[in-house]
Image (cartoon, rainbow, N blue to C red):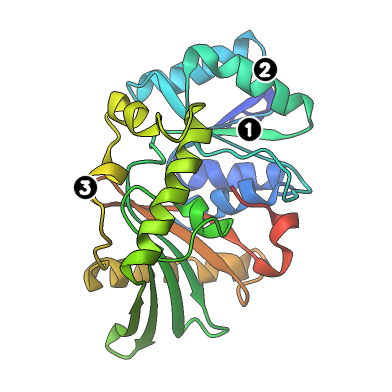
Amino acid sequence: MARDARGFAPIRDAESARYAIDRFGRFPKLLSWLVLHSAELPTLSGVIVSRWDLDVARGVEEFASALDSNRLLMRSDSSAESGHSPRGGYLIALAQLEAEVRPLLEQGRIVFLLEPSSPFDDLYSMSLQPDLDWQEWQLDVVGSGFDASDLKRGDVTPHEQVRAHLGRNGVMVLERVVAQDDVFRASRAIRLEKAARMLGCSPEDAPTELRELGETMLLDIQTYRPIPDEALIDTIDDAMGLRQELVSRRLDDRHVAISASLLGYAGRRVFWDIVWPRSKYRIGDE
């Protein structure tokens, strides 16, 4: 059971997510992560932090220790996001958590800390948009070293756009449009500038910083490789499991965009959140 009364709530499975939804449902981005857990889609485990004290700090340390990690991926949310809301989605060392988390809580935000996943280590990231009947799917895809926030915030042009159909025999990829090489090169320059902001260095120093971190996917893969059909089909198959969860919770299932990534060279599939585009800034993005 999630220990929200103590200021932190570990979310490791569908049961703990369902318990937390009742308490944290007014935070749309956080809610969508919990709904993904509740629907049992592959999603990172995490801990919700609603205040900071010694008890919460110990709980967070226990959570990180169970992962054998000294860093966590930090995200935050509020009940009314805007285009100027603080960005999240970056790794924070445990020793720096208090300094990062307290100011967000003081702004009336809620913080959720996820198992560590570098934003520079995604093999592919996708935004999946089903039609009203969840039969036709439009996907925007970015390649290696980019992340889901690049699509959610419109930071870069998609490297590939895919149209797929769910029929009697399962999911079929119908059409692909792959960006020209010059589009990909331009997006890499934009991504390096964004990486520099995240790392607190100049764009010129970003490659060195990434190499020191051992997170060189953006540097090592300098052309876009179309995402395999199998990866697309498996991701859509997983996403289909979300619709009934949305309906059962009386959430909009007819106008949604679902964010997912394949992490690392092994391509571990992870779903990040659900965005309702009609309410983009009220719902929030990363």
- Marks 1 and 3, how far apart in space? 29 Å
Q: Which residue is mark 3?
A: 265
* x and y, in percent, of residue 15 in the image: 50, 45
Amino acid bearing label 2: Trp
**Amino acid type of disc 1?**
Val
Q: Quadrant of residue 281?
A: bottom right
Residue indicated by mark 1: 111
Q: Residues within 10 Å of mark 2 (few under 14, many from 20)?
A: some
Mark 3–mark 2 CB contact (< 8 Å): no
What kind of residue is marked 3? Tyr
Q: Give the Cα separation between the discs numbered 2 and 1.
A: 10 Å
Q: Quadrant of the N terminus?
A: top right
Which mark is on residue 228?
Answer: none
Relative to 247, residue 110 above or below: above
Q: Name which quarter of the figure residue 240 lies in.
A: bottom left
Q: Residue drawn at (57%, 14%), measured in percent from left and top?
A: 57
Dot 2 or dot 1: first in sequence order is 2
The residue at which mark 2 appears reads as 52
Can I make out residue 11 in this image? no
Which of pointers 1 and 3 lies earlier in the amino acid sequence? 1
Q: How many residues crowd around disc 1 within 10 Å: few (fewer than 14), some, or many (20 or more)?
A: many
* Disc 3 secondary structure class: loop
Query: The residue tagged with tag 2: helix, strand or loop?
Result: loop
Which circle, 1 or 3, is nearer the viewer? 3
Note whether residue 198 is visible. yes
